[in-house]
Image (cartoon, helix red, strand yellow):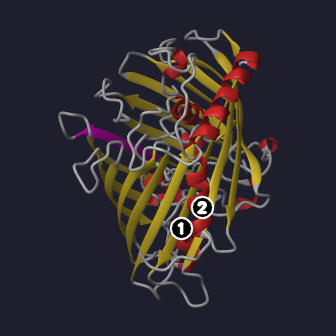
């Protein structure tokens, strides 16, 4: 897969060190409990509610390539400590480490071709109201850190070394400072209650058009695959998100957020620039947990103060539409197909036009005989709004498997065709290795 710098070994050892069996506390193992349900406001695996749910559901008997981890005992002690802390305070804790190394076959002159970066999340949920009931409410907190190992992070490789618009590794680049408060909000309600909302510092691109099958830490890597950025989504900042569940299949959601939001601070909501969106959600297959449903979003962004690009916004005022549909393609529910696409008017979104199609197979018959593995292949097309750019295409293939019960490894390949922001490169390959653990 090409030559990677020795620093990737650090990431690998970190994942192995943190791996091992976990204990499932009594309050987390209650089947059908409200706390055991997916977050009612987001399908993104990295959204705080869903990430905590994943951590709480870790199974000591999960099949893996190597069933025993060197530090399983330490993990058990950590899990017991979290359980004692929860019993005393009502606060649930969890963390995730995601590291990715990537090598490009081609790059612009004077730029790096390989690099390694880590994304680390600390999650806390303080249960304060109607604990265990459909109308439960509490405070969610997410501290996120990202760093590189004296290299150029994979996300930067795609955007700068390759001049790609689709990108090659979403989220894997350094922060300065290393850690920031990504989310801090109050959330209340559930699907069973018929309503839910969150208010505070929120992350819109982890909620609207989100999917359990499209996330850079668990499935595909590229920004085109994992982000709905033909939608001028603002960055993490002050906002309100709410959803009403009209039936067990249909829900309506709405979001209002600071268009000048900046994850490194509290934005500039006093400027009076807002992002607003309405979303229709339909579950055609409500009993299939691997299918994230159909979502259609209409949005408007007032633009940013001074016209500065932020996250999915170019800084210009505009509006658009984005849609995503997920469909089971096998009777056992293990094969899922996804199509998505969007259009941003007035050149206001990161992609003016975006189309993607993806196929995922859970527990495929090969190449290794362990459960909990996943194969995926995807296609992306994106047209940036900037004058002088060209249409870009990419094909992405990955295979993810558990090395230890709570350590997943992913091998990924991307073919990037016509990088949008250069004419010096017509095609390039990106080879990636990703490691993930939660505890």
Q: Secondary structure at mark 2?
A: helix
Marked residue nearer the N-terminal end (1 or 2): 2
Decide which of 11, 263 is in the foreground and name it: 11
- Callouts 1 and 2 close, C-beta under 8 Å: yes
One can see residue 18 in this view: yes
Decide which of 131, 435 is in the foreground and name it: 435
Residue pictured at 70% horizontal, 52% vertical: 145
Residue at the outermost left position: 331
On screen, residue 145 above or below 256: below
Pinpoint residue 417: horizontal percent, then vertical percent: 37, 76
Span of residues in magenta = 321-328
* 294 with respect to 73 (left or right): left
Residue pictured at 62% horizontal, 59% vertical: 118
On screen, residue 281 above or below 344: above
Q: Which residue is mark 1?
A: 101
Cα–Cα span, label 1 and label 2? 9 Å
Q: Secondary structure at mark 1?
A: strand
Kindly report the secondary structure that dominates the magenta region of the rendered protein.
Answer: strand
Pinpoint residue 181: horizontal percent, then vertical percent: 75, 44
On screen, residue 358 above or below 125: below
* 352 with respect to 373 (left or right): right
* 348 with respect to 280 (left or right): right
Q: Which residue is mark 2?
A: 11
Pinpoint residue 425: horizontal percent, then vertical percent: 44, 85
Residue pictured at 47% horizontal, 25% vertical: 252
One can see residue 240 in this view: no
Residue pictured at 36% horizontal, 59% vertical: 398
């Amino acid at each position: 897969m090409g030559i990677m710098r020795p620093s990737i070994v650090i990431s690998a050892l970190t994942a192995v060190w943190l791996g091992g069996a976990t204990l499932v506390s009594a309050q987390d193992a209650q089947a059908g409990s409200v706390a055991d349900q997916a977050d009612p406001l987001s399908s993104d695996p990295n959204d705080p509610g869903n990430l905590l749910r994943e951590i709480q559901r870790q199974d000591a008997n999960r099949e893996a390539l190597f069933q025993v981890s060197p530090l399983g005992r330490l993990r058990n002690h950590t899990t017991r400590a979290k359980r004692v802390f929860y019993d005393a305070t009502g606060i649930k804790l969890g963390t995730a480490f995601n590291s990715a190394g990537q090598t490009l076959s081609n790059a612009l002159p004077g730029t790096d071709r390989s690099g390694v970066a880590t994304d680390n999340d600390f999650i806390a949920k303080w249960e304060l109201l109607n604990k265990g009931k459909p109308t439960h409410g509490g405070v969610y907190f997410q501290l996120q850190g990202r760093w590189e190992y004296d290299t150029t992070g994979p996300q930067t490789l795609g955007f700068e070394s390759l001049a790609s618009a689709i990108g090659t590794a979403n989220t894997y680049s350094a922060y300065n400072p290393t850690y920031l408060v990504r989310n801090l909000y109050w959330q209340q309600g559930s699907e069973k209650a018929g309503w839910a909302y969150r208010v505070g510092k929120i992350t819109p691109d982890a909620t609207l058009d989100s999917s359990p099958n499209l996330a850079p830490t668990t499935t595909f890597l590229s920004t085109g695959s994992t982000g709905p950025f033909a939608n001028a989504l603002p960055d993490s900042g002050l906002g309100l998100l709410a959803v009403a569940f009209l039936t067990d299949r249909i829900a309506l959601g709405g979001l209002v957020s600071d268009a000048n939001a900046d994850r490194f601070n509290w934005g500039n909501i006093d400027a009076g620039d807002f992002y607003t969106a309405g979303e229709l959600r339909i579950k055609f297959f409500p009993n299939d947990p691997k299918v994230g449903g159909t979502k259609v979003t209409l949005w408007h962004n007032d633009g940013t103060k001074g016209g500065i690009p932020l996250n999915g916004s170019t800084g210009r005022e505009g509006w658009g539409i984005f849609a995503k549909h997920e469909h089971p393609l096998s009777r056992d529910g293990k094969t899922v197909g996804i199509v998505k696409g969007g259009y941003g008017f007035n050149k206001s979104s990161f992609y003016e036009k975006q189309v993607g199609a993806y196929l995922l197979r859970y527990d495929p018959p090969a190449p290794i005989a362990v459960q909990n593995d996943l194969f995926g292949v995807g296609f992306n097309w994106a047209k940036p709004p900037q004058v002088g750019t060209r249409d870009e295409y990419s094909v992405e293939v990955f295979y993810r498997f558990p090395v230890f019960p709570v350590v997943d490894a992913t091998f990924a390949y991307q073919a990037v065709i016509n990088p949008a922001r250069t004419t010096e490169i017509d095609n390039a390959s990106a080879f990636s290795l990703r490691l993930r653990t939660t505890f």
